[in-house]
Amino acid sequence: MNRFQVGYAGRILYVDLTDGTIDNRPLARVFAEKYIGGRGFSSRILLDEVPADVDPYSPRNVVVIASGALNGLPMPSASRLVTATKSPMTGALGDSNSGGYFAPELKYAGFDAIVIRGASKEPVYLFIKDGEAELRPAQHLWGCKVHETHRKIVAETNDEDTHVLVIGPAGENLVRYACVVTDKESVGGRCGIGAVLGSKRLKAIAVRGSRDVKIADPPRFKKVIDDYLVSIAGEAWTESLRRLGTPFLTEHRQTLGIWGAKNFQSGIVEGGEKISGEVFRKKFLVKPLGCMACFIRCRRYSAITAGDSPFYTKGPEYESIHALGAKPNITNPETILRAHYLCDEYGMDEQSAGSAIAMAMELFERGLLDRNQTDGQELVFGNGEALLYFIDKIASRQGFGDLLAEGTKVMGEKLNADYYAIHVKGLEVDAADPRKQETRALTYSVATRGACHLRGNPYIDEFIKPEEAKAYFGTAAVSDIDSLEGKGKMVAWSEDWVTLSDLMGICKFAWYRSRDFSMLVKRGLDMVAEAYQAATGIPMTSQAMYRCGERVYNVEKIFNLRQGFGRAADYPPERFFKEPLPSGPAKGAVLNRKNYDRLLNDYYEARGWDPETGVPTPGKLKELGLESDEIE
Amino acid sequence: MTKERIWYVEDSENMDQICSRCRMCELICTFHHHGVGNPYRSRIRVVALGKGVDIPVTCLNCEDAPCVNICPTGAMHRPQPDSMVIVNQDVCIGCGMCVNVCPIGAVILDPQEGTALKCDLCGGDPQCVKYCPAKVLKLTGSAQFSKHRMRGFARLLQSAND
Amino acid sequence: MRSNKQIFFHPERCLLCLSCVLACQMKHAGVTDVGRIETGQKPGWSLKVSFSGGTPWIWKCQQCQAAPCTEACFTGGLRLDQKSGIVVQDRESCVGCGSCVLACPIEGIGFQPGEHRPEKCDACRDEEVPACVRACQSRALDYAEGEQFAAQKRKHFVKKLTGAK
């Protein structure tokens, strides 16, 4: 028995869409030990296979779809799929993460990852079942929205247990931020993976398997599951997430005044109480849903059943409310839910869509855009009809939707309005306004896929104890939320540690939600290392595991450096340095450039990267076993 | 005496006590019986109908079980008059007639071994009940379940009269 | 791609018309027109219909995953083909000892009139859909993959339970 068919499925599938060849190879031990799974596999493969001169829409771009190492097992909250490519939004490494059932099913079908190369002349979809794969015609599916595509493919396979990843019309039309959706509900939103698949004319990937994911030591594994469950149940967030889903965060933003309202002009939303998590629960919630093996069950299943066009949808998430509510300043919850549903059906990232429309609204209000340019629409903040109108137009790239479909970075270039494009490296800022503290801004800006709050976890300083701060980061100052001392190191450490969740396939809500730092480390490192050993039989200490996280992060940095993203690309948008928040609880908050520079220096130093260029030093590369990846 | 089985118990007053389709029951069932991860060897499966209807389905422990009646080898049997129907794996020839005849699809053939698999109540300590996050699976006989329903109805009547 | 279909039976739809048995006989006789069966000719068949306690049932080889006939056969003439899910009979190796007939608990394999080697259902391997399934007018015979067959029944059960359409 191949040792790497324990815990792992043990094989990687290679598909060349240009000549239609399909191949698979065993998962090499060295590869598994160094990169673990998920984002580790995808980032390494992309670094090896996609050189700097490749255009994201060219057939030479590669898409990697990877399961985490612990997917497919009864590991709580281990359901996460990674889909990665060179992003058409940024030209940098791009990946998106989604839950549901696709990642486990891929392993039941016998594969840990799929590597998609080339481009097909005609639309096709990939069908994978129990170790075999074939390409099937998809001309009849081209043009179909997400739900319809899924239904049709499942009808074709005549098997309701088929799990399908699809792109919608947005991906087909190369909307730059088109996304992938599995099983009609799990969205791998960011970075435009859907557009790259659209350029390859790969409409969908259907997976069905009935193979075992073997476990090296079942009794040992059972003990970890039980301990892990007790730990998650003990977290206060578990209850909030189950009750309201991620929309519970709306209260936090409202209280602290750090919404990205009106394209990040303001931190407060007037009438923000109309779009709180409680409102969405009361008005639309059918019930909570859970991804595979998840005890938190943060997903919402919502519905609008009255009126002309009723619908059911998974969601909304907090980010839906942020992007389609706060950013365009829309406080009608029904409009937000409908906009969210449309984005899912068209297969495009609601964050980027909302950001593009919000930016256009600001330009319109400032007189930098007029009705002639905006299809006659009065594109002002708060115009819900315009929001819904343009979501349609973006998906089909018609009228002004064609420019909106390019995303804020290109809009900024084309309209000579870079300042109003709130992104880092081309990916729009999400989550919250970071002006209150440079550490948050740093986390968003150094993230390897563009502005993202999910690479690192700077909130550690809200609850870490001084003794813990001293032990882990060398200074008790890290426990002081107002201090910047040692925070560069803290952010760096948090990034490597959070990366592990994407290698293991475990959801971040099980991973990094705690108000107790020692429990975070215990659950996120020790228990997971134990689970990994019990599942695969491969020796793995917490230290070695952490090193894998660091290794993957460095691989991603190298990819970006080769694409020309140096130190200058690790800065937040100018607005955050120039404009203090005008009102609300965070009034006056603004980033200090000197402080940010110093923090970035600390971060590079902590990482073992050159302070001016951000290039990993030879010493650091050697430490991580990446000597052959030196940048000239 | 009524026969015991795993039954799905939703609480209509509490939307959190509804199946969330997390399928942990499927995973823990296979893990308990076979020590691997594979929902397709599970003896309980969640049926997703859409529009928020997700119901786990497993053996109802029929009084006059068609699977027992049809089994040509006697592998499918009830050890005691009041126990759950179980499969003797040493005797089962994997003919699939029990799969054919079960009215609710609760019996399957093991995709690895080919023999019949069905709920055996984990010998008395059902794992799916333990690990369900929504606490919607209960070990219950039909009498207990009726009582539960009657109590709920009585409460409803009382609150209507208040 | 491998498709592991089996023949399933819905007793509640069976009309006891025995068209399935006739179709099987025609297959054995090698005719497609029933008029071509000669007077006195008794073609063999691989499936039987019974009616006990008011319930019809189809008896044929079940292509068992752990088939006793394969173990009883000492020439190796019977084996389960993993790809098709059919217990395949190698008539060259068969010596007609009848051990398989004794071993089978459901009379799925049997000696046909005038034949020295026993015969069993092979789900019409040479065709897309078995003859009996094609012949059944009330869709009591189904040709499906086992996992989907059970899944369909579970779905039907839940629909009934919840009143969903």
Image (cartoon, coloured by chain):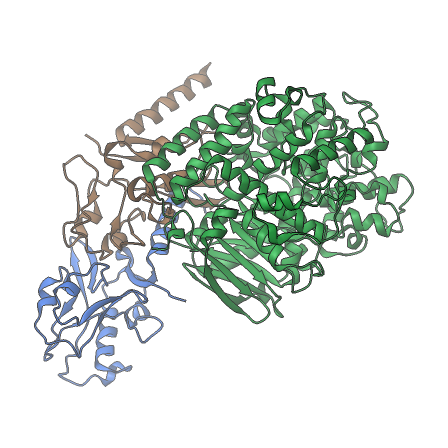
- Asked if A292 appears above or below A113 in the picture, the reply is above
Q: Position of residue B39 (x, y in %)?
A: 38, 46
Chain A: colour as depicted? green
Q: Any idea which chain is the brown one in this picture?
A: B
Please give the name of the residue rendered at 52% of the width and 67% of the height, measured from the top-left corner: A136
Q: Is residue A129 visible?
A: yes
Observer-nearest residue: A178 or B19? Answer: A178
Q: Is residue C29 left or right of residue A429?
A: left
Q: Is residue A477 left or right of residue A140?
A: right
Q: Is residue B56 visible?
A: no
Q: Is residue A434 left or right of residue B40?
A: right
Q: Residue furthest right?
A: A367
Identify the image quadrant of residue A75: top left
Please give the name of the residue rendered at 51% of the width and 47% of the height, measured from the top-left corner: A34
Identify the image quadrant of residue B127: top left
Q: Any idea which chain is the blue one in this picture?
A: C
The N terminus of chain A - image quarter: bottom left
- Asked if A22 appears above or below A401 in the picture, the reply is below
The C terminus of chain A - image quarter: bottom right
Q: Position of residue A277 (x, y in %)?
A: 63, 29
Identify the image quadrant of residue C88: bottom left
Q: Is residue A239 left or right of residue C138?
A: right
Please give the name of the residue rendered at 14% of the width and 76% of the height, measured from the top-left corner: C94
